[in-house]
Image (cartoon, rainbow, N blue to C red):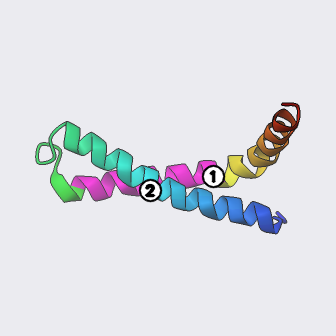
Amino acid sequence: MNFSKSTRAVIGVGLVGCFLTSVAGVSAVMISSGWAVHGGWAEWVKRLAIAYPSACVVVVTVFPWLVPKLTKFFLASSQSE
């Protein structure tokens, strides 16, 4: 695949966003349902090790296709206002 500079930037930002979202999601679930009950740090790392790569797959496969379409849509809708 040959990605443009803007596509690479979007994927890079998406990967950072995936990491932050994965950390927030895993932490929130474990804190809300009892940290120690679910295994503490060992379980947190295990859940993050599953969540982050899964989110990265979505970014790498879906974002290059979706972002240009959304950009065109939002630019067209903002120009019509």
Q: Is residue 16 above or below residue 37?
A: below
- Compare residues 42 and 11 and report the one nearer the observer: 11
Q: Residue furthest front?
A: 81
In the image, residue 58 lies in the stretch drawn in magenta:
yes
In the image, residue 60 lies in the stretch drawn in magenta:
no
What amino acid is at disc 2?
Leu
In three-dimensional space, the C-alpha distance between marks 1 and 2, rounded to whole angstroms, equals 13 Å
- Compare residues 26 and 46 and report the one nearer the observer: 26
Residue at x 60%, y 56% (from the top left corner): 14
The image shows residue 30 at horizontal and vertical percentages of: 24, 44
The image shows residue 11 at horizontal and vertical percentages of: 67, 60
Q: Is residue 73 left or right of residue 34?
A: right
Q: Which residues are magenta?
A: 43-59
| Structural crowding at the residue carrying mark 1, measured as other residues with C-alpha within 10 Å and reported as few (<14), some (14–19) or many (≥20) | many
Quadrant housing the C terminus: top right
Judging from the image, what secondary structure is the residue with disc 1 in? helix
Residue 32 falls in image quadrant: top left
Residue 75 falls in image quadrant: top right
What amino acid is at disc 1?
Val
Q: Is residue 16 above or below residue 26?
A: below
Q: Main secondary structure of the magenta part?
A: helix
Q: Is residue 37 left or right of residue 55?
A: left
Residue position for label 1:
59
Quadrant housing the N terminus: bottom right
Q: Is residue 70 left or right of residue 35?
A: right
Residue at x 12%, y 43% (from the top left corner): 37
Numbered circle sitting on residue 20? 2
Residue at x 53%, y 56% (from the top left corner): 17
**Discs 1/2, front:** 2
